[in-house]
């Protein structure tokens, strides 16, 4: 360590002050922390201004919010010129950014960035060089695989898998989907177009199903992409019986293209099949003094469809209709509903829940 570094540390310790972090030191620190040394050109894209968090290079010309420092008249005139050009709708060269994971740092174009901010722009055209982690830690390997898969097919978002070497299974799906599109003479043989169609019409609908199913709660360390891969691989590629998510078979055909057509025929991505009705009967003993108030509360609950007074060991019989996610537990949903509503009401002394097995309703098939 140099004598200057030692003196800075001693001074910081004695005065209790930390060295002020500049946008430049922030970038350098982040690059070192991530071990991000391998540079890959990602082309020109629109980047949200909120994701540009730091600066590289000419950081001394700007404050921590990328505003030109006072006393720099030449640079202020330059900024005004860029503002006039942008207001007039004239083309402005793209800025240059370094990307480290989800964050971006300005390499060139600080004034254009500041002008875009002042004009209320949300995005700015940027030439991107991504700095990838170069070590062989699991975290770095996973990030490189995610980034390479996104770039390979020009997908809009990174697919977040938590196990290395698994993107090959999505490669298989994209290749199979491309074959289908070519054979149906709807598309050419462009793998990029096939990949984007796979992403929009197969992966995203399946991902929505997984997220709405409640299945992720059973796998807190996994992502929805992990479960999409697991289910789709067993369903479409391996044809194996699964241990988890087997109720998805009711929603997902064993043929990937059949699933795609089913999802495409829907006007909205709400997938009503993810909900199932549960009918529950409940017997209640109540305090007669609270009967009027209890009946009022029951009438206000949409889940309670019928209310009957009965003679015998119970006072009331009610029919309850609940809606559960396809993969959630009936027992848990019923217990949650009764514990959080009916059994919290003053005047309810005891309840007994009856869950019907087979139901036959006259007039219905």
Image (cartoon, rainbow, N blue to C red):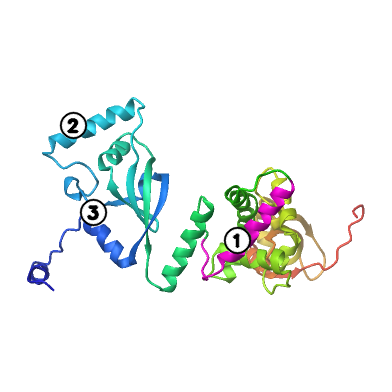
The quarter of the image holding the N terminus is bottom left
Give x and y (percent) for residue 214.
Answer: 61, 63
User: Is label 1 in a helix, a strand or a loop?
Assistant: helix
**Span colored in magenta:** 160-184
| Residue underneath mark 2 | 77
Q: Circle 1 sits on which residue?
A: 171
Location of the C terminus (image quadrant): bottom right
Query: Is 87 positioned to the left or the right of 169 in the image?
Result: left
Q: Seen in the image, is 246 located left or right of residue 112? A: right
The answer to whether residue 86 is visible is yes
Residue in front for this viewpoint, 335 or 91: 91
Alpha-carbon neighbours of circle 1 within 10 Å: few (<14), some, or many (≥20)? some
Would you identify the image quadrant in which residue 33 lies?
Answer: bottom left
Q: Is residue 23 above or below residue 119?
A: below
Which residue is the site of mark 3? 23
Q: Does 355 appear above or below 273? A: below
49 with respect to 294 (left or right): left
Q: Which disc number belongs to residue 49?
A: none
Identify the residue shown where x is 58% and y is 65%: 168
Residue 165 is inside the magenta segment = yes
Asked which secondary structure carries label 3, the reply is helix
Q: Nearer the viewer, mark 3 or mark 1?
A: 1
Residue 185, x across and y down, in percent: 72, 44
Which secondary structure lies at badge 2? helix
Magenta run includes residue 200: no
Alpha carbon distance from label 2 to label 3:
23 Å
């Amino acid at each position: 360590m140099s004598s200057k570094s030692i003196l800075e540390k001693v001074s910081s310790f004695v005065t209790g002050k930390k060295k002020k972090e500049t946008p430049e030191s922030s970038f350098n620190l982040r690059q070192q922390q991530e071990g991000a040394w391998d540079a890959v050109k990602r082309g020109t894209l629109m980047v949200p201004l909120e994701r540009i968090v730091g600066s590289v290079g000419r950081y001394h010309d700007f404050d921590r919010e990328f505003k030109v420092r006072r006393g720099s008249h030449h640079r202020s005139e330059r900024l005004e010129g860029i503002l006039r050009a942008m207001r007039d709708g004239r083309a402005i060269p793209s800025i240059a950014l370094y990307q480290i994971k989800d964050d971006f740092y300005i390499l060139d174009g600080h004034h254009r960035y500041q002008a875009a901010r002042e004009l209320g722009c949300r995005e700015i055209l940027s030439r991107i060089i991504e700095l990838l982690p170069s070590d062989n830690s699991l975290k770095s390997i996973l990030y490189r695989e995610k980034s390479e898969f996104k770039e390979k097919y020009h997908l809009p978002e990174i697919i977040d898998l938590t196990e290395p070497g698994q993107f090959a299974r999505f490669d298989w799906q994209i290749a199979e989907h491309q074959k289908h599109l070519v054979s149906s003479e709807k598309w050419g043989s462009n793998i990029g177009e096939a990949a984007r169609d796979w992403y929009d019409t197969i992966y995203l609908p399946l991902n929505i199903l997984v997220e709405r199913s409640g299945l992720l709660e059973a796998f807190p360390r996994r992502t929805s992409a992990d479960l999409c891969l697991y289910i789709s691989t067993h369903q479409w590629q391996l044809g194996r019986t699964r241990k988890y998510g087997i109720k998805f078979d009711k929603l997902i055909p064993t043929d990937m293209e059949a699933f795609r057509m089913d999802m495409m025929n829907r006007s909205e991505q709400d997938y009503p099949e993810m909900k199932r009705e549960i009918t529950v009967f409940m017997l209640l003993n109540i305090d007669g003094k609270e009967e009027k108030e209890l009946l009022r509360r029951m009438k206000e609950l949409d889940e309670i469809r019928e209310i009957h007074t009965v003679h015998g060991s119970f006072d009331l019989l009610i029919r309850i209709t609940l809606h559960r996610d396809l993969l959630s537990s009936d027992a848990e949903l019923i217990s949650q509903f009764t514990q959080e509503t009916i059994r919290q009401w003053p005047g309810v002394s005891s309840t007994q829940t009856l869950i019907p097995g087979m139901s036959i309703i006259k007039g219905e098939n």
